Image (spheres, grey):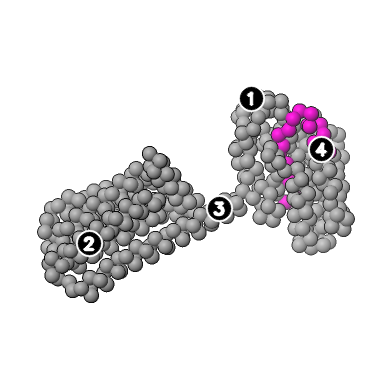
């Protein structure tokens, strides 16, 4: 049972990696084309005098068309289906090797087995690969034994063919395992870039939303506090000092705000020169949260003066049930709007809003 669970997990992980880099569909379509083509070729060869029992070859080849249809469908292939497909390939190829009339066709079928092994390398773990290795040894021994029995191949040719089969499997395994490792790294990089701002390293809006979706902390007697920070006259910094300095201002701001980061606190660059913070805090921390933000923003250097406007909004977690969608994501989306409005009221010098606490901070960066 442990091996089955482990195998299923490996299959799910491999499938997920291919899905994340948009290759899973291509691999399944290629599999569909290959199995259909091999089944058609096997039938054609069988009825061209290359099989001692052509109707047996016909019978074991017909399911190949069904597998081709299954892999062509957009519905993902399950782990048991994938194992059944590999088992079908093994059985049909081994039987085919036993009934061929020439060694050349037997070795063609060994090449088909290499293709089945390659599929196994892509999707399955060590147990399946070990089984495929054993099947390959048996199939190769049958092909060589048949060649010796028929006397239609000499020793150098047999040695060359066996070495080629072994080398082809080794190369396929090396390429697939190395490629899957690279694919996994590439997929992780893509996921990171999809959820993070590449300039500051903070979460972007999508990453912030997903972080809120995954939050599973204790909601008892706690509040959601959302702060929006906007750098004042940021365009003038770019115009005066250049975009390189402007980028450094954004990075420095992100580093300062990271002082607020914690298990129940998320930081994001919302876009441009606007940053957002989401914190799940105890009730007695709500009224002082603007000071927490101000302290973080006041920790800069003294070369380029940068002003910022801050809007803060909060909501008791116990009130989530009042929202159309009683989730942290919905609450944060609502509070981001309120905090953003509060921040713009600060910029205009208007009075405080009912849902917000605002402060105007000034700091310098070095």
Q: Quadrant of residue 217?
A: top right
* Part of the protein shown in magenta: 272-291
Disc 3 vs disc 1: Cβ atoms closer than 8 Å?
no
| Residue 276 inside the magenta-drawn segment | yes
- N-terminal of the pair, mark 2 or mark 1, is 2
Q: CA distance from mark 2 to mark 1?
A: 69 Å
Query: In x, y percent, where is residue 10?
Result: 43, 47
Q: Residues within 10 Å of mark 2 (few under 14, many from 20)?
A: few
Q: Is residue 259 above or below residue 174?
A: above
In depth, the one of 256 and 150 nearer the eye is 150
Residue located beneath label 4 in the image: 290
Q: Which residue is mark 2?
A: 141
Q: Disc 2 or 4, which lies upstream in sequence?
A: 2
Query: Considering only vertical position in the picture, is 67 above or below 142?
Result: above
Per the image, the residue denoted by label 3 is 188
Q: Looking at this view, is 85 or 98 the one in front?
A: 98
* Residue 229 seen by the camera: yes
Residue assigned mark 1? 321
Quadrant where the C terminus lies?
bottom right
Q: Is residue 56 left or right of residue 233?
A: left
Left or right relative to 263: residue 36: left
- For the N terminus, give its image quadrant: top left
Between circles 4 and 3, the one closer to the viewer is 3
Q: Assess whether mark 3 and mark 4 are in contact (beta carbons under 8 angstroms).
A: no
Measured as percent of width and height from the top left, residue 295 is found at 84, 43
Q: Residue at x 37, y 64 (%)?
A: 170
């Amino acid at each position: 049972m442990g091996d089955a669970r482990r195998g299923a997990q490996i299959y799910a992980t491999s499938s997920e990696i291919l899905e994340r880099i948009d290759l899973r569909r291509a691999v399944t379509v290629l599999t569909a084309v290959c199995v259909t083509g091999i089944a058609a070729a096997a039938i054609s060869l069988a009825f061209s005098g290359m099989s001692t029992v052509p109707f047996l070859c016909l019978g074991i080849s017909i399911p190949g068309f069904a597998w081709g249809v299954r892999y062509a469908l957009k519905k993902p292939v399950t782990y048991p289906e994938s194992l059944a497909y590999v088992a079908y390939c093994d059985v049909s190829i081994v039987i085919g090797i036993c009934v061929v009339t020439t060694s050349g066709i037997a070795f063609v079928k060994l090449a088909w087995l290499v293709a089945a092994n390659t599929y196994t390398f892509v999707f399955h773990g060590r147990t399946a690969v070990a089984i495929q290795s054993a099947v390959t040894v048996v199939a190769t021994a049958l092909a060589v034994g048949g060649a010796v029995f028929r006397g239609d191949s000499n020793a150098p040719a047999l040695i060359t063919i066996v070495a080629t089969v072994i080398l082809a499997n080794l190369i396929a395994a090396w390429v697939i395992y190395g490629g899957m490792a690279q694919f996994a790294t590439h997929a992780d990089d893509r996921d990171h870039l999809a959820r993070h701002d590449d300039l500051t390293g903070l979460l972007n809006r999508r990453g912030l939303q997903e972080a809120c979706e995954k939050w599973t902390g204790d909601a008892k007697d706690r509040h959601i506090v959302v702060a929006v920070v906007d750098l004042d006259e940021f365009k003038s910094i770019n115009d005066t000092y250049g975009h390189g300095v402007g980028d450094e201002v954004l990075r420095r701001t992100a580093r300062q705000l990271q002082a607020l980061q914690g298990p129940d606190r998320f930081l994001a660059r919302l876009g441009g020169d606007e940053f957002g913070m989401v914190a799940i805090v105890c009730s007695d921390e709500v009224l002082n949260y603007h000071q927490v933000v101000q302290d973080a923003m006041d920790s800069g250097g003294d070369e380029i003066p940068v002003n910022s406007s801050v809007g803060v909004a909060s909501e008791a977690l116990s009130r989530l049930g009042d929202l159309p969608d009683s989730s942290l994501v919905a609450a944060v989306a609502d509070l981001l709007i309120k905090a953003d409005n509060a921040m713009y009221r600060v910029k205009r010098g208007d009075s405080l809003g009912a849902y917000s606490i605002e402060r105007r901070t000034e700091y310098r960066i070095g």
